[in-house]
Amino acid sequence: PLQANYKNTAFNFSLRMPDGFSAQELPADDTGAATVLLQNEKGEGIQIRISPFDDINELTADMIRENIPDMQISEAEAVTIGPEYTGVAFLSDNEAFEGASREVWFVFRGNLYQISTYARLDTLLKAMFATWKFN
């Protein structure tokens, strides 16, 4: 069950995460991208990378392939973010997640959100993402 609340004031969103998870907000890098780590004591969890981006309403797997041709994308499916935005969920080969990752990418209010986790934590990611709210 998702008991703990996480609220990000910089990007105005909140979500629920399991007990035993903590949130760590890393400072923006030289590209302006910020990273949020939601993880348990074993270091397993979800990474959210937020970077400035054109304010578009739809991000598709084809658009990602066009911009990152080497990226592996499989089982892509559209994800609705509020009434106006559409992103994409897919499986990939992200080395940071043992070479098998679940990704959810979308653009909202001029920022690209890249949510990544271990493919084996897909159920957890879906449960947490279902509680995501922009304030």
Image (spheres, rainbow, N blue to C red):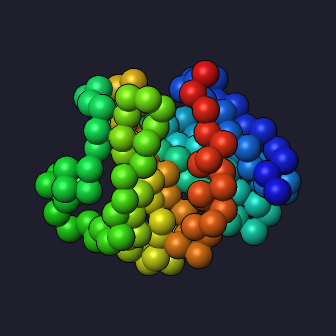
Point 63% across, 66% down: residue: 123
Residue 3 placement (x, y as % from top left): 84, 47
Name the spot of residue 89 as percent of width and height, x first: 41, 57
Judge from the rendering whether residue 75 lies leftward or rightward of residue 131; answer left or right: left
Image coordinates for residue 120, horizontal then vertical, percent: 59, 75
Residue 25 appears in view: no
Locate the N terminus and report the quarter of the image it occupies. bottom right
Q: Nearer the viewer, residue 22 or 14?
A: 14
Which quadrant of the view contains residue 72?
Answer: bottom left
Q: Position of residue 42 (x, y in %)?
A: 75, 69
State the count of labels.
0
Question: Residue 59, relative to residue 1: is it above or below?
Answer: above
Residue displayed at 50% across by 77% down: 98
Q: Going 39% across and 63% down the picture, which residue do you hit?
A: 90
Residue 27 in view: yes
Image quadrant containing the C terminus: top right
Q: Residue at x 73, y 44 (%)?
A: 16
Image position of 59 with respect to 53: above or below: below
Task: Find the residue positioned furthest to the front.
Answer: 83
Q: Nearer the viewer, residue 26 or 91?
A: 91
